[in-house]
Image (cartoon, coloured by chain):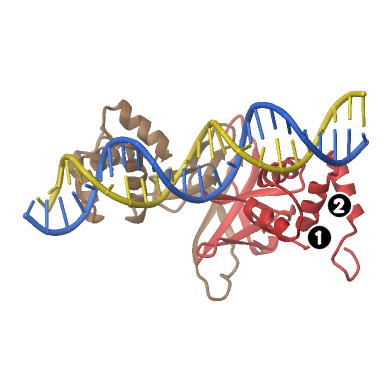
Chain colours: A brown, B red, C yellow, D blue
Amino acid sequence: MDSMKTVRPCSQIIAQLRNAGLRPTRQRIALGRQLFENGDRHVTAEMLHQEAVQAKVRVSLATVYNTLHQFTEAGLLREIVVDSQRSYFDTNMADHHHFFYEGQNKLEDISPDQVVVSTLPEAPAGTAIKRVDVIVRVS
Amino acid sequence: MDSMKTVRPCSQIIAQLRNAGLRPTRQRIALGRQLFENGDRHVTAEMLHQEAVQAKVRVSLATVYNTLHQFTEAGLLREIVVDSQRSYFDTNMADHHHFFYEGQNKLEDISPDQVVVSTLPEAPAGTAIKRVDVIVRVS
DNA sequence: ATTAATGCAAAATCTTTGCACTTTC
DNA sequence: GAAAGTGCAAAGATTTTGCATTAAT
């Protein structure tokens, strides 16, 4: 972890993008900073776009969508499916699960030791388990 | 369970609808039969509408959506969120979890004893746990 | 008869795409 | 300057809504 300031220098974001094989463009750097410089976050494309606009970053919603998917494919983000109406992206790549607040459409991490799945089925023949998602829905 | 024939008499569907406080209209009866007379099913609105059309049941897609939501609110169906692109509805109301075949967009029940969540977090203050969904994603 | 449900088409969302323009390397 | 990325607007896909018509009690 960093020092007192949670703000990572921009060069770290740039390095992160390069590592992932993504060109550090103005938009990717700006969105990357919004996503990664403020701890674990759960965002929708619309939310991130709003934030960017408010932060005076010129970026289109289409680019936000593209960027979120590029980041996801590059392993910088994880897509969480909790609501069939919109996609959420999680900056926390560690193994963990989620609370979903149904009324508020809000996602929250559950620390890994708070949910234990002690028995898992075998993957059906010809398949492999890719991921196990546990969603605790609260209201 | 019924006799050899898995086909429940129509009157049972009608009773089921009345119990749930829903008027047994032609469309609801037809959709109810498609859903409940063939064991546990996982359907999307589009799938159910296609089936209905093929079975020569005159019903609009909008009515299928309305009906699926009414059935869900009435406790006859459960909505499963696995894919942010479309909604799935499950006729199995018993406590259980799911496999999701990512390539095929197919859902399958996992029997309750095959997945055991042995530790659960407390619900955040002011909330109550409404449901815990476990999705095992395979491909 | 009264009240509820349906059908249709139109609107509303969310997301992706095509292509000219711009930026990065 | 070549290759990759972006913006915009338009298209796609899924789901919801409004209102006249039809059906159930």
Residue at the disc numbered 2:
B13
Q: Amino acid at mark 1?
A: Glu
Q: Which element is circle 1 on?
A: loop
Percent coordinates x, y for residue A31 in the rendering: 29, 39
State the residue lying farthest toward the bottom.
Answer: A125
Where residue A138 appears, x then y in whole percent? 61, 38
The Cα–Cα distance between marks 1 and 2, rounded to whole angstroms, is 9 Å
Q: Identify residue for label 1.
A: B37
Q: Secondary structure at mark 2?
A: helix
**Dot 2: chain letter:** B
* Picture disc at residue A24: none
**In contact (CB < 8 Å): disc 1 and disc 2:** yes
Task: Determine which quarter of the picture holds residue A33.
Answer: top left
Q: Earlier in the sequence, mark 1 or mark 2?
A: 2
Q: Is residue A105 left or right of residue A10?
A: right
- Disc 2 marks which amino acid? Ile
Residue drawn at x 85%, y 64% is B7
Badges 1 and 2, same chain: yes
Q: Is residue B122 visible?
A: no
Left or right side of A11 for B87: right
